[in-house]
Amino acid sequence: MTVSSNTAANKRWPALGELRHQISVLAPVAAPDGSGGAAITYALQAQVFADIRTNSGQSKLFDDRLTGDVSLSVWIRFIPGLTPDHRFGFGSRTFLIRSVIDHDGRNRFLECLCEEFVT
């Protein structure tokens, strides 16, 4: 089996065996907040398998506490309609999706650049 690569982004598609982490795709849902507005909550849309790759991380002082930001690439099989408004759940962790990339435009895999806020 040949593994394709995207030379422009220097990315390698994940092999099927690398999609080994089961994650939740969480879709935004607007719920009335009782004062005429809406609060955004997240509901389970799908359970998928993913390849989670850590890109970078940093620690910083926030509100007199040491916190951290972790940048991740999450590779999944193509899901129509996935946007940065969605989130991923992985156990007790939540990943905010910053961008969704279909590198070759063939609807096979998506690379989602994500951020995790660690407290």
Image (spheres, rainbow, N blue to C red):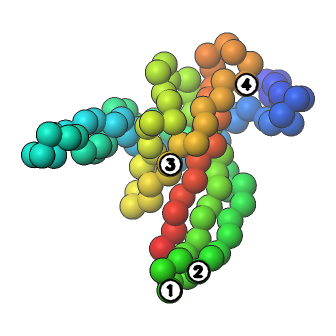
- Tell me, yes or no, whether the two marked residues, 4 and 1, touch with CB atoms within 8 Å: no
Image height of 85 relative to 56, above or below = above
Q: Residue 60: in sight, yes or no? A: yes
Image x and y of residue 27, in percent = 36, 35
Residue that label 2 marks: 61
Percent coordinates x, y for residue 100 in the rendering: 60, 32
**Which mark sits nearer the N-terminus, 3 or 2?**
2
Tell me which residue sits at (55%, 23%) in the image.
78
Q: What residue occupies the far right of the structure in this picture?
A: 7
The residue pinned by badge 1 equals 64
Label of residue 96 in the image? 3
For residue 49, above or below residue 108: below
Badge 4 marks a residue whose secondary structure is loop
In the image, which disc is placed on residue 103?
A: 4
Ranked by sequence position, the earlier of labels 4 and 1 is 1
Amino acid, disc 4: His
